[in-house]
């Protein structure tokens, strides 16, 4: 009997030790952290407004669209009510709809997309102002050779500059010879237009306009200048009047031969 009691006591002690060890092991082990995945609730039309507010301009969202289109609507839009619940997409703001590449409905006309940023224009290099001037004869005759002179003046620098200009007579490209002064030789002029006699002979009698057009370059800005000139008829060449043919003097009548006196006989 005493032996049985001893065995029971040993079993009890061992069970207690095992329980303490298990408790200690459990207290030393790190507690596992439970993780939960947030569930996304499918959007439904039940939580969306069904009628337009009194002040629709103050409405900022939400807006709705369909997975099968690229249009967003007011929730109360007639077209929005056709969207099936499984295809419904809800946007908190217009910006969200625009970010998803949706465009406003043409039926309910919700606020349009606003550009997120305006592209900055590339600054145009500043060109110095230029004044073009053309000078030449105010009047000349058909067939007469003439020269028109061009100057390009840099207004800020107070000097003439070089450059090729276009010449137009009565809005048509002028004939003749367009001369351009070489770089560094434009202090007096930038070039000239030379019209030979054959060129001016083609111009009609009357008033004409001559326009020069400087298109500018990377440094100097464009400019134009216009002048008028008059073409007259050529001066006729005077024809010399020939002298009249002289009338010859008449041939003189010869004197008659005198009759000799008779010889007297003594």
Image (cartoon, rainbow, N blue to C red):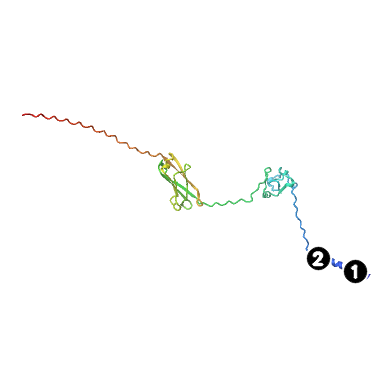
The residue lying at 84 percent from left, 66 percent from top is: 18
Q: Secondary structure at mark 1?
A: helix
Question: Quarter of the image containing the N terminus?
Answer: bottom right
Residue 31: image quadrant is bottom right
Q: Residue furthest left?
A: 266
Give left or right: position of 134 versus 75: left
Q: Is residue 66 visible?
A: no
Give the x, y percent position of residue 231.
42, 40
Looking at the image, do the residues carrying marks 2 and 1 touch, with CB atoms under 8 Å apart?
Answer: no
When the figure is inspected, residue 35 is found, relative to residue 148, above or below; the finding is below
Q: Quadrant of residue 15?
A: bottom right
Image quadrant containing the C terminus: top left
Q: For this rendering, which residue is in front, 235 or 252?
A: 252
Q: Residues within 10 Å of mark 1 (few under 14, many from 20)?
A: few
Seen from the viewer's position, the closer of residues 100 and 179 is 179
For marks 2 and 1, give the one nearer the viewer: 1
Q: Residue at x 92, y 70 (%)?
A: 3
Residue 81 sits in which quadrant?
A: top right
Q: CA distance from mark 2 to mark 1?
A: 27 Å
> Along the horizontal axis of the image, is 255 left or right of 98?
left
Q: Mark 2: which secondary structure?
A: helix
Q: Which residue is mark 1?
A: 7
Residue carrying label 2: 25
Q: Residues within 10 Å of mark 2 (few under 14, many from 20)?
A: few
Of 187 and 181, nearer the camera is: 181
Q: Residue at x 81, y 65 (%)?
A: 25
In percent of the image, x 86 and y 68: which residue is there?
14
Question: Residue 111, percent across and down?
Answer: 67, 46
């Amino acid at each position: 009997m005493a032996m049985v009691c001893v065995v029971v006591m040993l079993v009890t002690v061992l069970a207690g030790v095992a329980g303490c060890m298990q408790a200690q092991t459990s207290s030393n082990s790190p507690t596992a952290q439970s993780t939960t995945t947030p569930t996304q609730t499918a959007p439904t039309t039940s939580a969306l407004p069904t009628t337009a507010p009194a002040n629709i301009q103050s409405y900022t969202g939400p807006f709705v669209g369909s997975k099968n289109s690229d249009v967003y609507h007011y929730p109360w839009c007639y077209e929005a009510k056709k969207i099936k619940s499984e295809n419904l997409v809800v946007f908190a703001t217009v910006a969200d709809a625009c970010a998803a590449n949706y465009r406003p409905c043409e039926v309910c006309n919700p606020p349009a997309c606003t550009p997120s940023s305006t592209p900055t224009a590339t600054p145009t290099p500043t060109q110095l102002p230029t004044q073009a001037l053309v000078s030449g004869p105010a009047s000349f005759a058909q067939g007469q050779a003439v020269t028109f002179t061009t100057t390009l003046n840099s207004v800020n620098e107070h000097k003439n500059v070089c450059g090729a200009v276009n010449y137009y007579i009565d809005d048509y490209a002028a004939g003749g010879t367009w001369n351009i002064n070489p770089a560094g030789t434009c202090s007096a002029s930038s070039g000239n237009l030379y019209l030979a006699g054959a060129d001016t002979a083609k111009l009609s009698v009357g008033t004409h306009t001559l326009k020069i057009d400087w298109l500018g370059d990377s440094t100097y800005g464009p400019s134009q200048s216009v002048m008028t000139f008059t073409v007259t008829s050529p001066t006729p060449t005077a024809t010399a009047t020939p002298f009249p043919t002289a009338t010859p003097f008449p041939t003189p009548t010869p004197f008659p031969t005198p009759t000799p006196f008779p010889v007297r006989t003594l």
